[in-house]
Amino acid sequence: MSGFLFFLGCCVGSFLNVVIWRLPALGTIVSFKNRTAPLTLSWPPSHCPMCHNAIPWYRNIPVLGWLMLRGKCGSCQAPISARYPLVELGTGLIYLALYLGFFDAHWNNGPTPDFSGGAVAMVLYLVFVSCLLAASAIDADFFIIPLRIPYLIMAVALASCVFGAPKMLPSVVPASIGGKLAFGGTVGLLLSNALIYLKILPRSFATPHAATDHVDNVPLPLIPPPTLQKSWPQIAAGFIIAVIVSLVWVLCSATTAALATMVGGVLAFLIGILPRPMLAPDDSQLVLEESADVNARREISKEILFLLPPLCLAILAAAVPIALPALPWLERLLGVLLGLLVGGGMIWVIRIIGTLVVGRVAMGAADAPLMAAIGAVVGVPAVIVVFFLAPILGLVWAVVLKFQGKPNILPYGPWLSMAAILTLFIGNPIIHWYAQQLFPANAVPQRSSVIWPGEPTNPFSAGGSKP
Ligand SMILES: [Zn+2]
């Protein structure tokens, strides 16, 4: 099973390489071998961008194909970027880590050893990390996040409510204030969207160029895939990661090994995507200019109007003394919605406050939907961990950019995504530890659900049988 998931992850990584390069440019008219048609994910077939020769299947094997070709096209010897094998290796390691962590090492009080206990959560997490990896790489390259990626994550999270309740997935405590907040907030969010659609509420940054980063209504031109001449430092780093992960497996406990595999996968992926491909246009100057929109403060005020209905209705619903029915599916649904609202809301508030304070657009418009999607999967306490972990990871990269003398402008998507992937393991231990610092007498169980410590309806603290 471990071997299967590692191989599956490598194959998904291979597909992600296609998605990363083609998704922002879908629909652009391209010519290939006497045919001119809109670009899709499957057409044109994978080929060398220099000599246009098709790549045979045995050279398309993840990781190994690149190593066998020594990073060069089999026909014309054009260099192939080390990004491809590293994205494949990273995805494979993260898939492997999720399986081992939840079914072998019991991170997070995850599923029991038998697969049926957590298959729904596992499938949800595999889709989740794949989407986050694609969003990270696209954001790193183009400073955009195609909105269909967070929407896909939200759809899968909502669909998972139909299936039983694996204990890792978000849900609200019956009759808690969290459920009411989620209910009111969701109604408000639907209302805001309806008002935007009816043009009663104004759209912010409606003029075409002031749309700044992260808006994907116009397909980008397809640029040639990345080719880096000097790929050996990246490949060497990939080998070192593989060796360290293997050593940890031999020497350490399963818990440590699963975490090391996860961290190794994240590192391999970042080493693959962060050195910007030479042929990609350097958009950082463009993003810098666009974010300096003179009307930033006025435009961002329109977004406050959008957020008012969800906020007011959430508070109103919490104040109404009527309990929502205690239905298991409703508790799961409200748990997902609460995570979605809190995750998206936190980033959106930072975007608005930051823009009002500094007078330039502080954060991409798609970071809020991405964080909303993350919240929908990890639930409410854990999404707060993501919120505080992401800037710490981003700060490391800001230091690297500083040393390279590049402008200090970095996409936030990769850091939100990597923090979210790490939080699948370390989120609940951090929450547990933090809750114990706050409420030493009232230990909170390690569980990804909405728990309001001290509230009598909390079934875990009220039961008393299990601390
Ligand atoms: Zn070639």
Image (tube, rainbow, N blue to C red):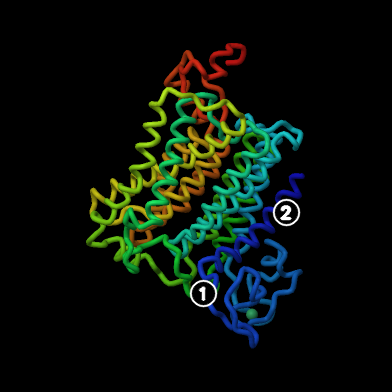
Quarter of the rendered structure image containing ligand 1: bottom right
Residue drawn at x 60%, y 28% is 327
Amino acid type, label 1: Leu
Left or right placement of residue 175 versus residue 120 in this view: left
Measure the alpha-carbon separation of dots 1 and 2.
Answer: 29 Å
Left or right placement of residue 300 versus residue 394 in this view: left
For marks 1 and 2, give the one nearer the viewer.
1
Query: 184 and 302: which one is in front?
Result: 184
Q: Is residue 128 above or below residue 80?
A: above
The circle on residue 7 is 2
- In the picture as drawn, the residue positioned furthest to the top comes out as 464
Quarter assignment of residue 282: bottom left
Q: Quadrant of the N terminus?
A: top right
Residue 2 appearing in the image:
yes
The circle on residue 222 is 1
Residue 54 position in % (x across, y down): 69, 78
Residue 245 position in % (x across, y down): 64, 45
Residue 200 position in % (x across, y down): 33, 54
Query: 250 and 301: which one is in front?
Result: 301
CB contact under 8 Å: marks 1 and 2: no
Q: Give the structural element (helix, strand or loop) at label 2.
A: helix
Residue drawn at x 71%, y 53% is 8
Label 1 vs 2, first from the N-terminus? 2
Quarter assignment of residue 330: top right
